């Protein structure tokens, strides 16, 4: 799993503390402390699964003796009623961790499923489907992981690892050239500079200023095609804004290199997945 496990552990600890607080009063009142249980995590609809290692981590942080056996792997296409994992161990720990584990698994699987769908629609065209910074606070690392699991790619992780000059930067700097020159002076020599433009004049200014990547913001596929011809390989071209299942194929066929889709993370629907307990017994 391509994730920073130390950071992930801190994130999950925060989720568990938020949910459990001083204790799970429902489970602790009803379930004996020595009760064991066995259950199955089951898909309730078709999709692409993502987050099984996180699900296992949630339960094992509550009780290291819980046995978790994944029957699918992240990135796998799954079908309704498919058993994704088996879990057994202390019943209190399993019931207490159920909601956090499923929230993560459902949410990340929804992202992976949506990403895989857009990748499929692009077909054999060259553009990479990439995410944005429009992520849920506290979940950026795992949401971007889910995009990769679904066959997409990551844009910059944060404000610190790439330069992206947008309209407000340009207004404050006094123009595209001034913004690019300031970014060159103030950023590491290894950082590529991307400029967001809205029209052909902006394309020309960004090229003249030496931008490495030009983002075409909210252009139609026909205008994108013209912009790609104008750029003629002198910079990478990213399409952004208004991309949907209905038009992504046309956007891809316009010849861009990248298609960024904020909806991969900011408004995705979770995949329906449940945990069914089949057996509870005293140890």
Image (tube, rainbow, N blue to C red):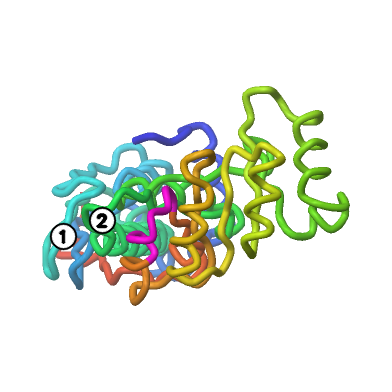
Instruction: Give the residue at x 67% y 47%.
Output: 206
Front residue (pair 274, 64): 274
| Cβ–Cβ under 8 Å for marks 2 and 1 | yes
Element at label 1: strand
Above or below, 260 relative to 192: below
Front residue (pair 77, 173): 173
Q: Earlier in the sequence, mark 2 or mark 1?
A: 2
| Residue position marked by numbered label 1 in the rendering | 78
Above or below, 35 relative to 186: below
Q: Is residue 168 left or right of residue 78?
A: right
User: Residue 209's spot in the image, x, y percent?
Assistant: 71, 40
Instruction: Count the marks.
Output: 2
| Residue position marked by numbered label 2 in the rendering | 49
Report the magenta residues as a range: 251-258
Instruction: Give the residue at x 42% y 53%.
Output: 256
Q: Is residue 265 visible?
A: no
User: Residue 270's spot in the image, x, y percent?
Assistant: 37, 69
Q: Is residue 241 left or right of residue 50?
A: right
User: Residue 155's spot in the image, x, y percent?
Assistant: 51, 46
Within 10 Å of disc 1 (Cα), the crowding (few <14, some 14-19, many 20+) is: many
Is 165 within the magenta?
A: no
Within 10 Å of disc 2 (Cα), the crowding (few <14, some 14-19, many 20+) is: many
Q: Is residue 167 visible?
A: yes
Above or below, 245 relative to 129: below
Q: Is residue 279 left or right of residue 57?
A: left
């Amino acid at each position: 799993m391509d994730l920073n496990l130390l950071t992930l552990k801190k994130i999950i600890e925060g989720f568990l503390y938020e949910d459990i607080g001083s204790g799970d009063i429902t489970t602790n009142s009803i379930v004996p402390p020595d009760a064991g249980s066995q259950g199955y995590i089951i898909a309730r609809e078709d999709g692409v699964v993502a987050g099984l290692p996180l699900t296992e981590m949630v339960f094992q942080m509550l009780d290291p003796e819980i046995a978790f056996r994944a029957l699918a792997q992240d990135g796998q296409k799954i079908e309704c009623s498919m058993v994704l994992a088996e879990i057994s161990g202390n019943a209190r720990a399993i019931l207490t961790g159920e909601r956090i584990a499923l929230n993560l698994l459902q949410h990340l699987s929804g992202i992976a499923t949506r990403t895989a769908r857009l990748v499929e629609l692009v077909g054999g065209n060259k553009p990479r489907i990439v995410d944005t910074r429009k992520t849920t606070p506290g979940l950026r690392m795992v949401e971007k992981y889910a995009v990769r699991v679904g066959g997409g790619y990551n844009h910059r992780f944060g404000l610190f690892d790439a330069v992206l000059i947008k309209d407000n930067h340009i207004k404050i700097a006094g123009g595209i050239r001034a913004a690019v020159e300031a970014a060159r002076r103030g950023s590491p020599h290894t950082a590529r500079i991307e400029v967001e433009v809205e029209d052909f004049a902006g394309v020309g200014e960004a090229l003249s200023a030496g931008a490495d990547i030009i983002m075409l913001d909210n252009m139609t596929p026909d205008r994108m095609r013209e912009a790609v011809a104008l750029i003629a390989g002198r910079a990478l071209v990213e399409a952004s804004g208004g991309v949907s299942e209905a038009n992504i194929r046309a956007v891809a066929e316009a010849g861009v290199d990248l298609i960024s889709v904020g909806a991969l993370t900011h408004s995705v629907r979770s995949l329906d997945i449940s945990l069914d307990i089949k057996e509870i017994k005293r140890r």
